[in-house]
């Protein structure tokens, strides 16, 4: 049976959300532990406690499951509504919430393990690197761009290049600390230190992009 794709024998059957969740959790754990090539759909099925056919009925191939697992890691800490403009009327608080969620995400053990995995695979599979970037960092950046565009339309910010501004924001948040974590040279920030760091980044960002008349 091909590892690339397997057709489900029961088209039209409703999918079980609990099984899908179990598959995603298993895929996340195995991809981070064994890498993409070292993880088979058989192993994921065994870890999730479902049949291989069930895995393929939810995810048509390993690449699709890989991308879904990355999204699952991100959405556990940064759900879709995280970028909801109406959730927080105050701009500073809105930016703080995004920044705090982002720092929690990128400095989590799961995210660090995923980044180390991708760095270890650098140059081996450009497609997988692209899938990771589009499913994770690019989605986060795209969400932030929408936040900035709405803030600019409301007169809260003056941003000539929203994509660059979004990248500046997240790069400031990652800072030197994230790199030290990646190489195992530091410990995760305390809650108080993380909050202070996010406050400082938001202040810098507002000084750069808040309209002069504000």
Image (cartoon, rainbow, N blue to C red):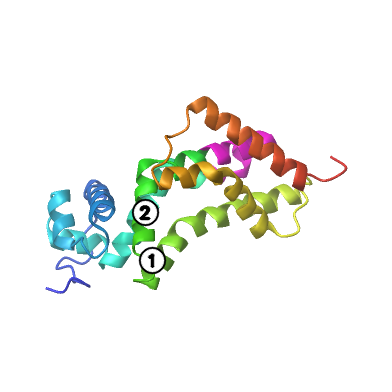
Q: Is residue 7 magenta?
A: no
Asked if residue 92 shows in the view, the reply is yes
Q: What main secondary structure does the magenta stretch of the protein show? A: helix
Residue 32, how many percent across, how many down?
A: 28, 52
- Up the image or down, 190 lies above or below 101; here it is above
User: Neighbour class for label 1 at 10 Å: few (<14), some, many (≥20)?
Assistant: few
Residue corresponding to mark 2: 116
Residue 184, how many percent across, how many down?
A: 38, 43
Q: Nearer the viewer, residue 133 or 12?
A: 133
Q: Which range is magenta?
A: 82-100
Give the residue at x 20% y 59%: 55
User: Neighbour class for label 2 at 10 Å: few (<14), some, many (≥20)?
Assistant: some
Q: Nearer the viewer, residue 184 or 202?
A: 184
Quadrant housing the C terminus: top right
Secondary structure of the residue carrying tag 1 is loop
Where, by quadrant of the figure, is residue 61 drawn?
A: bottom left
Direction from residue 214 to residue 8 in the image, left or right: left
Residue corresponding to mark 1: 122
Asked if residue 79 shows in the view, the reply is no
Badge 2 or badge 1: first in the primary sequence: 2
Give the residue at x 61% y 46%: 172
Q: Are marks 2 and 1 in contact (CB under 8 Å)?
A: no
Give the residue at x 73% y 41%: 206
Quadrant housing the N terminus: bottom left
- Up the image or down, 137 lies above or below 172; here it is below
Secondary structure of the residue carrying tag 2 is helix
Give the residue at x 12% y 57%: 51
Residue 30, how many percent across, how many down?
A: 23, 53
Direction from residue 116 to residue 146 in the image, left or right: right
Q: What residue occupies the far right of the structure in this picture?
A: 213
Residue 13, how many percent across, how many down?
A: 21, 60
Q: What residue occupies the far front of the structure in this picture?
A: 185
């Amino acid at each position: 049976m091909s590892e690339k794709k397997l057709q489900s024998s029961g088209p039209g059957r409703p999918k079980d959300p609990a099984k899908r969740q179990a598959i995603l959790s298993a895929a996340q754990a195995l991809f981070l532990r064994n890498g993409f090539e070292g993880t088979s759909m058989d192993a994921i099925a065994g870890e999730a406690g479902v049949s291989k056919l069930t895995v393929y009925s939810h995810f048509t191939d390993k690449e699709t499951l890989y991308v879904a697992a990355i999204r699952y890691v991100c959405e556990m800490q940064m759900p879709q509504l995280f970028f909801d403009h109406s959730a927080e009327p105050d701009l500073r608080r809105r930016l703080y919430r995004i920044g705090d969620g982002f720092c929690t995400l990128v400095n989590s053990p799961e995210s660090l393990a995923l980044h180390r995995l991708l760095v270890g695979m650098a140059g081996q599979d450009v497609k997988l690197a692209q899938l990771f970037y589009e499913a994770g960092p690019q989605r986060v950046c795209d969400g932030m761009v929408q936040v900035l565009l709405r803030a600019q339309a409301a007169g809260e910010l003056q941003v000539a290049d929203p994509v660059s501004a979004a990248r500046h924001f997240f790069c400031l948040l990652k800072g030197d600390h994230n790199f030290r974590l990646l190489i195992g040279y530091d410990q995760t920030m305390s809650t108080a230190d993380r909050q202070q760091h996010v406050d400082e980044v938001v202040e810098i960002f507002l000084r750069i992009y808040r309209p002069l008349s504000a």
